[in-house]
Image (spheres, helix red, strand yellow):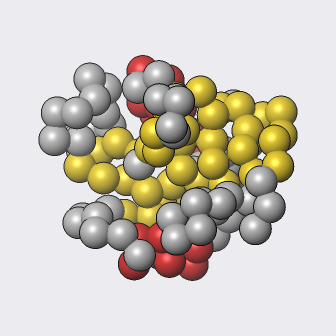
Amino acid sequence: MTQNRTDTTRLNNLWVLLVQNDGELTTQDAEGRVPMLARTGNDQKYLLVFKNVVKARQFLSSQAVHDAEPRMVVRANHDDIVRIARSAGVIGTLLDYDPATQKYASAGALA
């Protein structure tokens, strides 16, 4: 995996991981879920996105995350996901993050 910086990441047709909010964020979807975020060493937050459901499930299988659900970003949920991410202070996206190597395919601004 390489680490490339891109201008923006179009979220449509990418996959996010929805988890139960449990009061950590002030904004959530109608079912009380939020997309999974990553915090970097300089305390910046990123939305984790994946090219396909297989990569999303691989990430989940390597983590101790309970009740997480991969969800494709489509027109119907795009605005909710972006709204929640922005309210959490997310500055961008990490595509296909691998926690074992701490590398990702690319990073981009939240679009």
Instruction: Please state, as top left, top right, bottom left or bottom right, where the C terminus lies in the image.
Output: top right
Q: How far across and down, in percent of the image, does residue 90 sit?
A: 52, 29
| Residue 63 horizontal side relative to residue 85, left or right | left
Residue at (57% x, 78% y) in the render: 54
Q: How far across and down, in percent of the image, does residue 41 sit?
A: 51, 37
Q: Can residue 41 be seen in this view?
A: yes
Q: How far across and down, in percent of the image, does residue 36 sit?
A: 41, 48
Residue farthest front in this picture = 41
Q: Is residue 53 visible?
A: no
Instruction: Check the image and report above or below for 23 versus 22.
Output: above
Residue at (59% x, 53% y) in the render: 49
Residue at (63% x, 34% y) in the render: 92
Instruction: Check the image and report above or below for 2 versus 28.
Output: below
Residue at (74% x, 59% y) in the render: 105
Instruction: Check the image and report above or below for 64 versus 76.
Output: below
Q: How far across and down, in percent of the image, does residue 25 sit?
A: 28, 29
Along the line of sight, the residue nearer the viewer: 105 or 102:
102
